[in-house]
Image: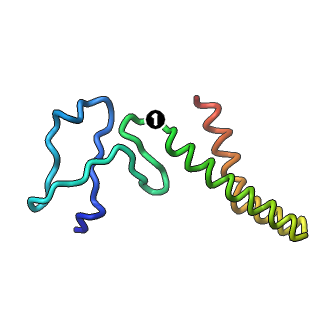
Amino acid sequence: MLLSSTKEIILGSACIKDLLSLTIHGSPLERVSVYKLLGVFISADLHCETHIEYIISKAVSRLYFLKQLKRATLSSEHLLHFYMSHLHWCCLAFLILSKTL
C-alpha cells in the first residue's frame, strides 16, 4: 500500500480537532479537506465550489485554445470537432448543475 497517496478526509460537520488520526503500520495518514477522486473534487463540507472552480479553469483554458485554433484559420469542421470533444461536456455539466442548485 502506498502511504504517500493514501489520504483521510472527514465528511460533514464533525469537529475535526477532536477526532484521532488514522494510522497504518504506525504511520499517520494525512488529513485533507479537499480530495480529487475519479476526476471530481470532494470537500469535507460537501460543497462543490472547488470542483466548479476547477471545471471553469479547464473550460477557460480550452476556450482560449479554441480561439487560437480559429485564428490559425482551422476549418469549421475541425473547430466543431474540438468543441464537441472538449467543451460540450462543460455546457452540459453547468446546465445540469444550475437546475439542481
Residue under the image location 61 percent in, 37 percent down: 97
Is residue 74 left or right of 87 when viewed as pictured? Answer: right
Residue under the image location 63 percent in, 45 percent down: 93
Is residue 88 left or right of 36 when viewed as pictured? Answer: right
| Total labels drawn | 1
Residue under the image location 65 percent in, 41 percent down: 94
Place residue 25 in its image quadrant.
Answer: bottom left
Kind of residue at disc 1 = His
Quadrant of the frame with the C terminus: top right
**Residue 55 percent across, percent down from the top left:** 59, 49
**Residue 18 percent across, percent down from the top left:** 16, 33
Is residue 27 left or right of 68 when viewed as pictured? Answer: left
Decide: few, some or many residues near mark 1? Use Cα within 10 Å; few <14, some 14-19, many ≥20: few
- Identify the residue at the far left of this view: 26
Residue under the image location 28 percent in, 54 percent down: 7
Residue beneath disc 1 = 47
**Dot 1 lies on which element?**
loop
**Residue 96 percent across, percent down from the top left:** 64, 38
| Display colour scheme | rainbow
For residue 59, above or below residue 11:
below
Quadrant of the frame with the N terminus: bottom left
**Residue 52 percent across, percent down from the top left:** 56, 43
Place residue 70 in its image quadrant.
Answer: bottom right
